[in-house]
Image (cartoon, helix red, strand yellow):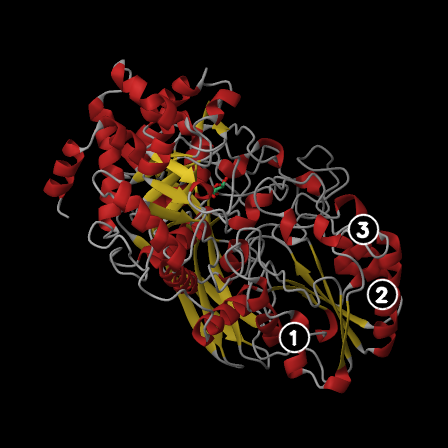
């Protein structure tokens, strides 16, 4: 439909019809089996259900066709219902969680993964996904760090932009793509204390310098939607925050799509103490420019009265409704309300498995490999631990992917290790008794008895083995929404298993499955090899065995700092220098910015990861020592594979502005390139440094660069390398 026809439709709609286009109802209003991802507020009134513009949490071509047929027949203008769903890292074929996908440092691969997710979701009748999550996350206590691509604004920017492109493709009308939704706007990851939904206190400088960057870069790719976040920022809830939604989002970022609230967030402005009642909340949401009220009931209950009293103008309403109708039009729903429903439902295919398997292998981060414990030797290998043979390898945000499609570590091992050389044992429960979930409550025996039995079985399997692959980690229900934790160690029952296995003197390869950084000091000491597997999804077992056996060399790099202790959180590499920087060497001068009982930096820093081969970085150089604002400098380094195996390496370019009108981080990622080299091969990797990479939010509150000296590192991780220097003149 063209714009003129759309406007004619809008003008022909009743006020009630217009209001209800801004209402999103829970899928449970239309389908009992809906996935509920928020607090339900009771059945909607019949007219709301009949006229609501969109719903969420349901999928399935036959199911949605039936719902759409009935809805369209009842709607006065036969405007199609829009179906939205959280396709965060997979629909049928589940990829690694985003914190793991970011670890590939391969935006192109992540874009392909988003394309595959969109194709599967569209075939199941989904029109829009609530992804990418572009929140910057520096705090391991915040469980939703799992859904992000970590602590760095540049990596997050490139990953979020790649996901928008992958989900939406070139034309939303084709049935292989879905509308994207950049979330959670804004700064949701800065929740005080790492506690979900909590207030964030950020200077405009920090907001602009760090937290807003990835949303802005993703919005340049024209996502159909942006979602408001639950948190307040400096005392004003995002969902009613005009500075964020009008000045930043609409004016500065030029976003013209649909602004949707998070689940119930309009009504939650009452809990925040920012709105007096539902009417006030609806008014504040509209004044901030929130187009769709997700499941709070405020718009459906109060918007017509706000219009009748003139508190909200018809013009304001029409603007919001036209954005929703335009999104439906861009999806081709007026021409084909059954978009994507004609196909049979999606299935996991060999092609989607291949893509997922490669993504898993590329996401794994090897942190330790003492004595080349990896790749595995052809010897007796015991796969032990609660993650050794479980199909629950996907996150809490992959609910549309069936566990039975998942390949476990043990199943994959059974395909490559000779029967006489492989054994498996669970070793312990996933969780400690105080956190045990309904899934693990042991009916036939009590928890301690069960763990005693599991340990005994594991010890006998370990005694038989030459090497133990110990599969430990955080249960997938312990990261994601509303899963903040003040302690980030492995469960005590798993640490006990590790200590007992250590007593056998066998080689230990520890795999950590997790959606957040964990405290791994003891695990590091007791393990010969240590690898982060994140939450790897459907092809987890295959991707992991491809790396364990050496078929693929590990190339993942940390997307987030792993601390010595949770006491360091929030922890991030791009910190400010302070007036008393701690000397790198063991300085004896006590009056510096440090802890008495812990290092300042991370146990494992952002950008860190090992390979099965080794790489030498030589001849780092700059093409010039000075650069004008219209100029550019080439920064290059020669990288050589000095080992005996093929491998990939992510060359990272960091920059530091040494003197400026506002303090600047000790270094910031400015670019990265992932290359693959055969043994003995070498390649010159070069980057172009331009003036716009040096801009920041100055003391004058302008986005500019300032003349002066800069340091440049071309290196292996955020703590590696020696700086080169140039001057911006
Ligand atoms: C949830 C989440 C958000 C999700 C939405 C719809 O509360 O905060 O990320 O997209 O509701 O499920």
Q: Position of residue 475 (x, y in %)?
A: 67, 53
Task: Give the mark nearest the N terminus, 3 or 1.
Answer: 1
Q: CA distance from mark 3 to mark 1?
A: 27 Å
Image: 474 above or below 237: below
Label 2–label 3 contact, CB within 8 A: no
What secondary structure is found at the residue carrying circle 1?
helix
Marks 1, 2: nearer the viewer: 1
Q: Nearer the viewer, residue 706 or 653?
A: 653
Q: Residue furthest top?
A: 309
Task: Give the mark nearest the N terminus, 1 or 2.
Answer: 1
Q: Which mark is residue 502?
A: 2
Q: Which mark is residue 411?
A: 1
Q: Residues within 10 Å of mark 2 (few under 14, many from 20)?
A: some
What residue is at 60 percent from the left and 74 percent from the top?
A: 547
Name the side, left or right, on which 437 lies relative to 144.
right
Image: 67 above or below 17: below
Name the side, left or right, on which 196 lies relative to 710.
right
What secondary structure is found at the residue carrying circle 3?
helix
Look at mark 3 in the image and give the residue it sits on: 492
Label 1–label 2 contact, CB within 8 A: no
């Amino acid at each position: 439909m063209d714009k003129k026809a759309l406007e004619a439709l809008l003008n022909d709609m009743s006020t009630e019809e217009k209001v209800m286009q801004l209402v999103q109802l829970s899928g449970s209003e239309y389908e009992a089996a809906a996935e509920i991802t928020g607090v339900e507020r009771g059945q909607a009134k019949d007219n709301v259900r009949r006229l609501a513009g969109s719903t969420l949490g349901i999928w399935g071509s036959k199911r949605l066709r039936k719902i759409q047929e009935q809805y369209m027949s009842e709607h006065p203008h036969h405007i199609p219902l829009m179906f939205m769903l959280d396709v965060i890292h997979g629909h049928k074929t589940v990829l690694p969680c985003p914190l793991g996908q970011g670890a590939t440092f391969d935006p192109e691969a992540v874009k392909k993964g988003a394309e595959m997710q969109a194709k599967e979701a569209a075939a199941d009748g989904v029109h829009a996904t609530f992804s990418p999550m572009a929140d910057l996350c520096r705090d391991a206590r915040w469980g939703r760090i799992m859904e992000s691509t970590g602590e760095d604004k540049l990596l997050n920017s490139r990953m979020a932009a790649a996901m928008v492109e992958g989900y939406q493709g070139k034309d939303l009308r084709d049935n292989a793509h879905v509308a994207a939704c950049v979330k959670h706007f804004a700064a949701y990851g800065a929740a005080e204390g790492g506690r979900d939904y909590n207030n964030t206190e950020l200077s405009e400088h920090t907001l602009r310098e760090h937290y807003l960057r990835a949303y802005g870069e993703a919005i340049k790719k024209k996502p159909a939607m942006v979602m408001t976040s639950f948190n307040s920022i400096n005392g004003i809830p995002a969902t009613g925050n005009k500075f964020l939604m009008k000045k930043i989002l609409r004016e500065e970022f030029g976003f013209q799509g649909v602004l949707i609230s998070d689940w119930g967030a309009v009504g939650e402005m009452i809990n925040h103490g920012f709105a007096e009642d539902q009417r006030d909340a609806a008014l504040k949401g509209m004044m901030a420019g929130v187009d769709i009220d997700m499941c709070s009931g405020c718009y459906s209950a109060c918007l017509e009265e706000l219009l009748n009293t003139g508190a909200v103008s018809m013009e304001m309403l029409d603007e919001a409704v036209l954005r929703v109708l335009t999104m439906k039009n861009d999806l081709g729903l007026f021409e084909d309300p059954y978009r994507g429903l004609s196909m049979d439902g999606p299935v996991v295919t060999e092609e989607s498995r291949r893509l997922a398997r490669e993504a898993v292998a590329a996401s794994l981060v090897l942190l330790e490999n003492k004595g080349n414990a990896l790749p595995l030797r052809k010897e007796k290998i015991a796969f032990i631990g609660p993650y050794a043979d479980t199909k629950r390898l996907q996150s809490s945000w992959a609910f549309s992917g069936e566990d039975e499609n998942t390949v476990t570590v043990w199943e994959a091992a059974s395909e490559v290790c000779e029967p006489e050389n492989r054994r498996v044992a669970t070793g312990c429960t996933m969780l400690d008794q105080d956190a045990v979930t309904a899934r693990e409550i042991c009916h036939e025996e009590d928890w301690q008895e069960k763990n005693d039995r599991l340990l005994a079985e594991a010890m006998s399997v370990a005694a038989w083995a030459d090497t133990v692959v110990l599969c430990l980690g955080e249960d997938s229900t312990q990261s994601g929404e509303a899963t903040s934790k003040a302690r980030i160690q492995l469960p005590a029952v798993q640490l006990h298993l590790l200590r007992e296995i250590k007593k056998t003197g066998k080689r230990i390869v520890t795999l950590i499955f997790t959606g957040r950084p964990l405290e791994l000091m003891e695990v590091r000491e007791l393990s010969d090899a240590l690898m982060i597997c994140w939450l790897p999804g459907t092809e987890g077992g295959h991707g992991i065995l491809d790396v364990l056996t050496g078929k693929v060399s590990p190339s993942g790099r940390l997307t987030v700092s792993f601390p010595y202790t949770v006491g360091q959180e929030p922890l991030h590499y791009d910190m400010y220098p302070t007036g008393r920087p701690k000397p790198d060497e063991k300085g004896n001068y006590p009056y510096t910015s440090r802890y008495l009982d812990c290092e300042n930096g991370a146990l494992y820093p952002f950008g860190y990861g090992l390979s099965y081969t080794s790489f030498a970085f030589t001849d780092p150089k700059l093409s010039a020592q000075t650069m004008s604002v219209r100029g550019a400098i080439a920064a290059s380094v020669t990288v050589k594979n000095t080992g005996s195996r093929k491998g990939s390496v992510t060359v990272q370019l960091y920059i530091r502005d040494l003197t400026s009108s506002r303090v600047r981080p000790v270094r910031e990622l400015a670019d990265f390139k992932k290359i693959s080299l055969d043994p003995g091969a070498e390649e010159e990797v070069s980057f172009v440094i331009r003036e716009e990479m040096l801009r920041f939010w100055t003391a004058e509150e302008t986005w500019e660069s300032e003349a002066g000296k800069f340091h440049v590192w071309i290196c292996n991780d955020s703590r590696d390398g020696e700086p080169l220097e140039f001057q911006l003149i």
